[in-house]
Image (cartoon, grey):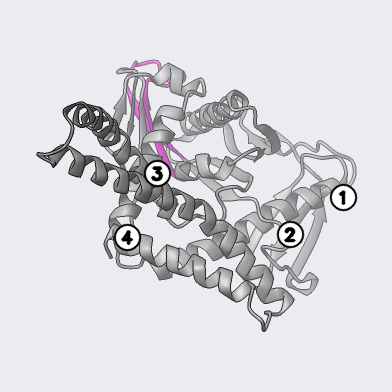
Amino acid sequence: MSLDENLSRVLARHEELASLMSSSTPPSADDFTKLSREYAELSPIVEGITNLRDAESEAQDLAEMIADPDGDEEMRELAEAEFLEFKETLPALRRQVELLLIPKDEADSKNAILEVRAGTGGDEAALFAADLFRMYQRYAEKRRWKFEIMSISEIGIGGYKEAIASISGKDVFARFKYESGVHRVQRVPVTESGGRIHTSAATVAVMPEAEEVDVQIEDKDLRIDVFRASGPGGQSVNTTDSAVRITHIPTGVVVSQQDEKSQHKNKAKAMRVLRARLYDREREMLDNERAETRRSQVGSGDRSERIRTYNFPERRVTDHRINLTLHQLDAVLAGDLDAVVDALTTEDQARKLAEMT
């Protein structure tokens, strides 16, 4: 479908919705809510289309004035100056409308649950997982988002076997969703005396934090076990059975929390993570159905694929999905991720626009 056909379809649907809502036979309350929500979502697009078409119409009028051999010379010069301005603004208006036409991911505005786990590479992988977790924490701080550590499983030398955080703020998931996947590091480990470069990996999972209305969880589907929390090496860190393990029986998803001294708080945290994992699972199943024949690496959320390499000897960060290389390793690890995220977002938008035509 061409851009003009898409625009006409949106305008027609907007008019249809207005007619349905003002019909002499009014829809039910539920239907009216759905219609008004869709009408509100289309309204900014309609405004953009109107601005674009008005500008195109004015540009056409100016072109005819310029081409008129009998026209006034002074008016023609003014028309030419205005026409040049329109030639500069029209592409931006068109691009704005195209971006508005891209189907919105309903999860983009949600908060996120971030999970970072050490992969292949032993202690070095755990140290890298800790580096990544701190990178995301700094990124959240730079964007003034709330970064709440939910649980950390440490090893003795400062590495993380697993770390989970909740990130809250405006459009968090929209900015974090491209981080899911395998992150690879190439560097000389601090534990390596021979000075050889090792390759290690960590996996990152980013899930939209689900509200209770997003995922319905029945009590009968849960098995909740409590146990005594333990620290590194197995030593007890609590004298009461405050740690909580929740198993979602239908899916087999298991979540454990032991960072809090209160069993109630650990259960509440575990439920947040469980709800996010189940919601993410549902989204992934829908994505697979919708895009089975045209899976894209950008934004696919496939955690088995290698998405990025952090090369310390060359101070280089390479995102393999879009062939982006930045020689700004220190800045990226310090939380300056916007250049990477912006490039991934632009690529994803371009792909979605191509699929619409």
Task: From the top left corner, tell me how far across and down residue 158 is, in percent.
Answer: 60, 24
- Verify CB contact (< 8 Å) between mark 2 and mark 4: no
Could you tell me the amino acid type at mark 3? Gln
**Magenta residues, start to end:** 180-202
Secondary structure state at the residue bearing disc 3: helix
Mark 3 lies on residue: 96
The residue under label 4 is which amino acid type? Met
Q: Nearer the viewer, residue 168 or 330?
A: 168
The answer to whether residue 285 of the structure is visible from this angle is no
Residue at image point 26% right, 61% down: 2
Residue at left offset 39%, top offset 44%? 96
Which circle's residue, 3 or 4, is located before the other in the chain? 3
Q: Please say if the residues under marks 3 and 4 sit with CB atoms less than 8 Å apart.
A: no
Mark 1 or mark 4: name the one nearer the start of the chain.
Answer: 1
Which-is-in-front pick, marks 1 and 4? Answer: 4
Which x, y percent locates residue 182? 42, 43
Give yes or no for contact between labels 1 and 2 (Cβ–Cβ under 8 Å).
no
Tag in front: 3 or 4: 3
Tag 3 or tag 2, which sits nearer the N-term? 3
50 drawn magenta: no
**What type is the residue that disc 1 sits on?**
His
Q: Which residue is mark 2?
A: 246
* Residue 18 visible to the viewer: yes
